[in-house]
Amino acid sequence: MQAHGVCLKAEVPDFDTAADAIGVAEIFQSERAMSFHEVRFPLRLSLSVSGGPERRVDIVNLSNGREARNRRWRDARRRYDAGSGVRSVADLYAVLEFFEARGGSLHGFRFRDPVDFSSSAPGDPATGLDQLIGIGDGETAAFPLAKTYGDAAASHRREISKPIDGTVRIAVGGVSVAAGGFVVDAATGIVQFAADHVPAEGVEIRAGYEFDVPVRFDIDRIELNLEAFRAGRIPSIPLIEIAP
């Protein structure tokens, strides 16, 4: 696919080749090198930020007074404003330092949602019975962590890709699995059972955990004015959820 004579990335998988094609002398970092930084946004700041899930729905008003509604996104996408958690110049510097270390919007990172960060309800400890993540078939040994939101009318299953290391609890058929019976990839959220612990056919696999949201900065510049900050004006520092 071509756009105004520029070869788009989807057609040329190698960034260096693409750069040569459009006459760019040097590529400092390719998308493959961007990856994801397995570091968390400062926790003391994330607990005070504003934000939450966003969904996109197309709504058309019909001539009979009714509406036609179409869901554009399968999953919600979370947005946050990190600026709302800044309370001091030290906090402001911590955000600035973190922003520089991530290369602005170049690298993703972990962020703790101040409300939705556990497999259990707020205030309750996570247990191995919290969330159904799969049904055994006697052969499958790997299952992705997931969280289900719902009520009697509908439900939504969300994949959890950034569990917090050391918090994952697993139960198979209602029985807790010892730590040696499984491992969890904290970078992907995949639970891998040991060969002698593969769940039998028909049994429920459940999990409990705490988790972070994968995000990036949704801004290329942080504009600071110390006098304005001291007067109570907080800079907007948006974050947006990504698929790492």
Image (cartoon, rainbow, N blue to C red):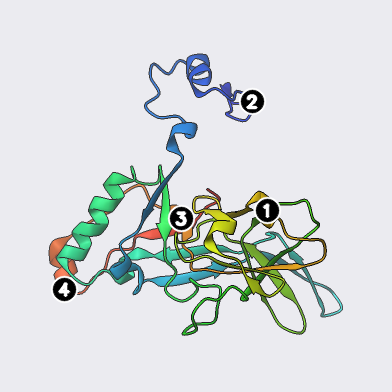
**How far, Cα to Cα, is label 3 from label 4?**
30 Å
Alpha carbon separation for disc pair 1 and 4? 63 Å
Residue under label 1, please give it.
196
Q: Which residue is mark 2?
A: 11
Q: How many residues crowd mark 2 within 10 Å: few (<14), some (14–19), many (20+)?
A: few
Q: Which tag, 3 or 2, sits closer to the chain's start?
A: 2
User: Which of 84/44 is in front?
Assistant: 44
Q: Nearer the viewer, mark 2 or mark 1?
A: 1
Please tell me the numbered disc located at residue 151: none
Please state which of the two labelled residues, at mark 3 or mark 1, is closer to the viewer. Answer: 1
Of tags 2 and 4, which is closer to the observer? Answer: 2
Q: Residue shown at 21%/65% (left/top)?
A: 91
Circles 2 and 1 in contact, beta carbons < 8 Å: no
The residue carrying pointer 4 sits among few (fewer than 14), some (14 to 19) or many (20 or more) residues within 10 Å by Cα, namely few
Q: Quadrant of residue 76?
A: bottom right
* Residues under numbered marks 3 and 1 in contact, where contact means CB atoms less than 8 Å apart: no
Mark 2 lies on a secondary structure that is loop
Q: Earlier in the sequence, mark 3 or mark 1?
A: 1
Q: Quadrant of residue 68?
A: bottom right
Helix, strand or loop under label 1: helix
Mark 3 to mark 1 CA distance (whole Å): 36 Å
Asked whether, in this view, residue 77 is left or right of residue 199, the answer is: left
Q: Earlier in the sequence, mark 3 or mark 4?
A: 3
Which label is found at residue 215? 3
Residue at the farthest right position: 64
Classify mark 3: helix, strand or loop: strand
Q: Which residue is mark 4?
A: 231
Q: Earlier in the sequence, mark 2 or mark 1?
A: 2
Q: Please say if 189 is above or below 22.
A: below
Give how far across and how far down residue 172 sits, in percent.
68, 68
